[in-house]
Amino acid sequence: MLGYVFKRILLMIPTMIGISIISFVIIQLPPGDYLTSLLASMADSGQTVDATEIARMRANYGLDDPMVVQYWKWISGIILRGDFGYSFEWGRPVSELIWDRMGATLSISVAALLFVWAVSLPIGIYSAVKRHSIGDHIATLFGFLGLAIPNFILALTLMYVSYKYFDQSVGGLYSPEYVGADWSWGRVWDLLKHLWIPVIVIGTSGTAALIRILRANLTDELSKPYVVTARAKGLSEYEVIMRYPVRIALNPFVSAIGWVLPQLISGVTITAIVLNLPTAGPLLLRALISQDMYLAGSFILLMGVLTLIGMLVSDLLLALLDPRIRFT
Amino acid sequence: MNRISRRGFIASTTALAGLGFAGIPAFAQGEALPPLEDRLPENPLVITPTDRPGQQGGTWNHALVGGGSLSMLVRYQGYEPLLRFTPDWTGIEPNVAESYEVNDDSTVYTFHLRKGHKWSDGHPFTTEDIRFSYEDIFQDPDAPSGSGQGYWQAGGEVGKLEVVDETTFRVVFAEPNGFFAQSIAWANQDRLTKAPAHYLKQFHLRYNPQANELAKERGYESWVALFAREHGLDEDNIHYQNSTRPTLNAWKFTSAPGEDTERAIAERNPYYHKVDTEGTQLPYFDRVVYQMVSDPEVLLLKSLQGEVDMMDQYIATPANKPVIYEGQDKGNYHLFTLKESAANVMVFQLNLNHVDEVKRDLYNTRAFREALSHAINRQDLIDAVFVGQGKPAQPSILEGDPLYNEQLATQHIEYDAELANELLDGIVPERDSDGYRLDPAGRRLTIVFEIDQVRSTFIDMFELAIPMFQAVGIDAQIRTMDRSLWETRVRNGREFDATAHQFGANSGIAAMLDPRYFVPFNNNSIYAPGWALYFSAPDNPNAIEPPQEIKDQQDRYRTLLSSGNPEDQMATMAEILQAAADQFLVFGVSLPPDGYGIVKNDMVNTMPVMPNSFGWPTPGPSRPEQFFKE
């Protein structure tokens, strides 16, 4: 087991190098660089910048260096000094920017994850056990609706409803009077008033998907001989289902952790933009649009690392949960 | 704490900035401010409020969309040049300067600063700051920085700065520079009031021998980069991301954009140099709070809810007008009118400097452009995209303006496919089996319009315009692309066939300072990039020598820039417009309909009708410092 973990971690190193190179190159691939996009927005607001000025600014930013040199500057800073570089656009160290957004990002994502599990587990089990009952049909209907409606539409709709009927400040996590205020019960209540929309929006599609997966897996298991045997032994119906088939049907929950971790960081970007959430997703998108390469590159690198860690964790958990899986 | 003490150390080593830093903590805690008469200059600027005098206090709730939009800040709290445009945009008046004089041939400009004027940290603002901005930033031998400073040039030379005494300085030009005063008032161009010498010297190698070490410590390669970051004059984004640099503006950032990615806060500048007619020091608002919103739709909802006190950017589109209009009662706001100043809603621009010789010759044929112009049914475009608001017009001057030129505005404006076909038959009569015309080289006559994809109204208009071009045998196509690709291929390229853009100006001073569609003179004249470069840098390898009539036009524009007499300026501009009408280089759709913005009902002293422009940075010249809430 320990040897297996060690081997996996060792294997991560070349993967990480690959990820860092690919993400850096991809960010550089579109035509132009940060200055081009900066100049475009300056031209839009009526300013002109002359050619020598542009050349000087380019040199200041180090954009004239070949890509290999730029990559080395970036990656050596990370490895040797833990310095992720500087965001051109925000004028602050990348690590500070990402860190700033972590609190909100994690709290929303964890809340959404708990919401997904809390809702989909019971409903999934119910619709598998009581297949083709009216309750199952209703759950299925809502499940498909949740899968089919794009998140951002749902977000816009809920925002409009809460504006129109609840008269509540929309967007963001707080009403303006509580942004930056000290913690108080009023602020917590205000946060809860805002949190339900992102949690529902982000959770809905995940809930729907998990209900369907759980239902399908559990249905397969329920007709297997060991279930019949358990029943024949006189176990209560509740114990029969919870003890064996549900445990096996849980596998997809666990294997999903590999994707959950990076999602915790990047969040659901489009939803976050629509809802004006102070999470990391919009920051990443903005960095990509303005070609703020160190910020964007570090983000992607971070997500790569988290995916790798998530995969490892989910593999280990899977092995713990399901004795049929062996380490190799 | 750590940062402050480090700064303090550097301040004492330079022995220059000590005073300034002693002031900052006092300001931050809002105590121990000297009495008002010591904070105001001896002769403060007296502002006559738009409606009535108010009282200090309150918060201006504001919003910005996205991190890259800080150039908007000049509109709300950054418009403090030496001279500024009047609220009705008919002229200029002293602002930071107490007064100014121009000699008869516009070669010597004399400015007088206000005695006792202070930066937001209490340090005196004198001609030393002017000298520093000119010598150590603009004309610095090691790190010159002059973006947008072309107006300092006359006769190929930069004007010379002469400091007379603590409050008086002169700018002397080798040749007449008639627009220098107007250019100073133009948004974001005056840097003389934006560089506090006592603060910035610590980052400049000439004043602080340790500047390089300081830069390294902060993660920059040399003092040049850190210095550029600290003064931020090359990039608005950076300029406003600094909350430690003192300012002359009405409000000073205490939490600058970027220091917090969710919102930015600016507090009143206790040393602001303006008072109202009752002697109350301005600004009225104690604070400006900007919510940083990531999406315009969210801003729209917030505005509908009344969370934003005044907004005319981002959300005030024709499509949003019904919902914004309907929400007035609930959001407790009303609409104001924006007089659009752009020369057209969309300008079709064929690449007159195309690398392909056949295409270039064709595009440079006036009758060909006439034919394309006649092929467009402008009323259809206006009805579909601008809900019927607007009247067909070429890029031109507004009707009613003294410079209005009827030929320029209305020539070749009628939709007449027959006439277009007739004209084209005279130039490119051959057609292929699909009915498309063949160019003189025998290829199908294809014109690809390359469009920046964020310009959604353009794309909507092209949906209708493409079939109109096809109906006269032109294989017109539209290719939308990401902005950075567009910038590379179109603004900085030579190989595109055609594009469309907007902006420019349709009246008075603005048209003289930005005649992009009448004279190819800078990189906003996208239809003739090579000729435009020839105007500013004829030696540049990418510059293309234009034909004589364009050269004459560029000479006329030079004459205009050098004349200081308003009557001469009008006469020369009229000549330029007539020549532009004769040349007919570009064609458009309609003059822009009036825009709108929203303002909360309890906001006092805003203007019901304002120009919408970048040069008159709406609503900056309407004097936000005298806005207040009842």
Image (spheres, coloured by chain):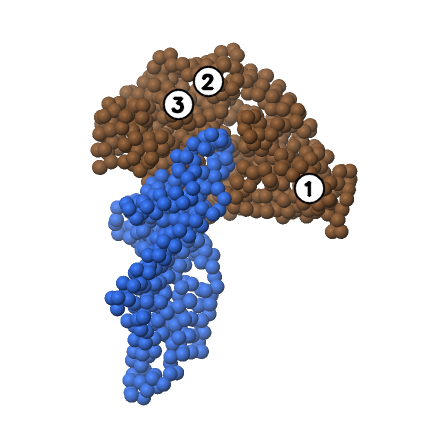
Left or right of A270 on screen, residue B497:
right
Which is closer to the viewer, label 2 or label 3? 3
Residue at 29% across, 27% down: B202
Secondary structure state at the residue bearing disc 2: loop
Q: Residue at the spot x=43%, y=20% of the render?
A: B94
Label 2: few (<14), some (14–19) or many (≥20) C-alpha neighbours in 10 Å: many
**Residue nearest the viewer, comparing B460 with B561:** B561
Residue tagged by mark 2? B159
- What is the three-letter code of the residue carrying label 2? Gly
**Relative to B210, A124 lies left or right:** right
Disc 3 marks a residue whose amino acid type is Pro
Q: Is residue B163 visible?
A: yes
**Count of marks placed on residues:** 3
A181 in relation to B282, above or below: below
The chain drawn blue is chain what?
A
Q: Which residue is mark 1?
A: B376
Residue at the image position 34 percent from the left and 28 percent from the top:
B247
Residue B328: percent from the left, percent from the top? 47, 44
Tag 3, which chain? B
